[in-house]
Image (cartoon, rainbow, N blue to C red):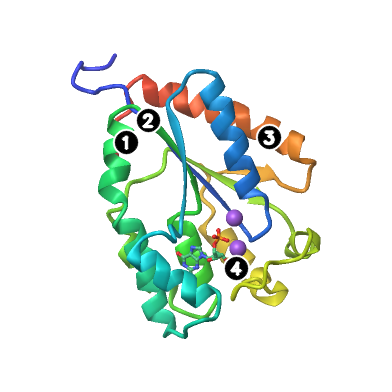
Amino acid sequence: ESNGEIKARGALIVLEGLDRSGKTSQSARLLSYLNSLGYPVESWRFPDRDTAVGKMISSYLTNQSQLDDHTIHLLFSANRWEKRSLMEAKLKSGISLIVDRYSYSGVAFSSAKGLDIEWCKAPEVGLLAPDLVMYLNIPPEKAAERGGYGGERYEQLEFQKNVAKYYEMLTDPSWKIINACLPLEDVEKQMKEIVLDCVVSCKKGKPLS
Ligand code: DGP
Ligand code: NA
Ligand code: NA
């Protein structure tokens, strides 16, 4: 069916969820799973704290600096934009990316502060569209019980409850909702199958958008 111009490419797989929902552990597991099957894959995360913008974000999250809510929102978005061309190059070269947080975190966390949701979405327009969004669903109370939060700015139960409401608003029928309350291995099992389907269908030449 492919017209021959569409080259096999990697899949853009996004993991979303509240803090302590298990995204980071699952990213690592999915990375080794796809690797073991011979698929070229990398694990990414946003914010990427290694760039100049990322360092400003990190300083804000650890309460070493204060920034206006709009300003930090745009910095998070800029942090995704600065990685866009590399992301596109990787996908086009056939490498799949498992990305821990993306635009949905951007919108959910800033809207939860009271910023207008449409305003929050605007700077995300034009970033690459994920092939798959997996939402690790966990009640905020349950996430908070998991070995406690790390003490960063947003890691507070009341705020996370608000973030959960905005994630719910953003949820699209195409999202895969993962029951993140289950034991790690069961969560992994649910996700592996979904991820493999996605990687295979992108390899068949689904165009990038
Ligand atoms: P993490 O490194 O995944 O723990 O993320 C750091 C914190 O920043 C976490 O509480 C979620 C939040 N966050 C991630 N991306 C964004 C974003 O784009 N905008 C805002 N406002 N917060 C974000
Ligand atoms: Na965090
Ligand atoms: Na995380």
At label 2, the amino acid type is Ile
Mark pair 3, 1: CA separation: 25 Å
Left or right of 182 on screen, residue 27:
left
The residue to which callout 3 is attached is 188
| Residue 120 appears in view | no
Task: Indicate left or right for 158 with 115 as reference.
Answer: right
Mark 4 / mark 2, whichever is N-terminal: 2
Disc 4 marks a residue whose amino acid type is Val
Residue contact at pointers 1 and 2, CB within 8 angstroms: yes
Name the residue: 41% across, 43% down.
130
Q: Mark 4 or mark 2: which is in front?
A: 2
Q: Nearer the viewer, mark 1 or mark 4?
A: 1
The residues bearing labels 4 and 2 have C-alpha atoms spaced at a distance of: 31 Å
Of mark 1 and mark 2, the one earlier in the sequence is: 1
Q: Residues within 10 Å of mark 4 (few under 14, many from 20)?
A: many
User: Quick one: SS at disc 1?
Assistant: helix
Which residue matches tag 1? 90
Residue in view at x 78 percent, y 58 percent: 146
Gap in angstroms between the C-alphas marked 1 and 2: 5 Å
- Residue depth check, mark 3 versus mark 1: number of the one nearer the observer: 1
Q: Which residue is mark 2?
A: 95
* Residue at 53 percent of width and 45 percent of height: 173
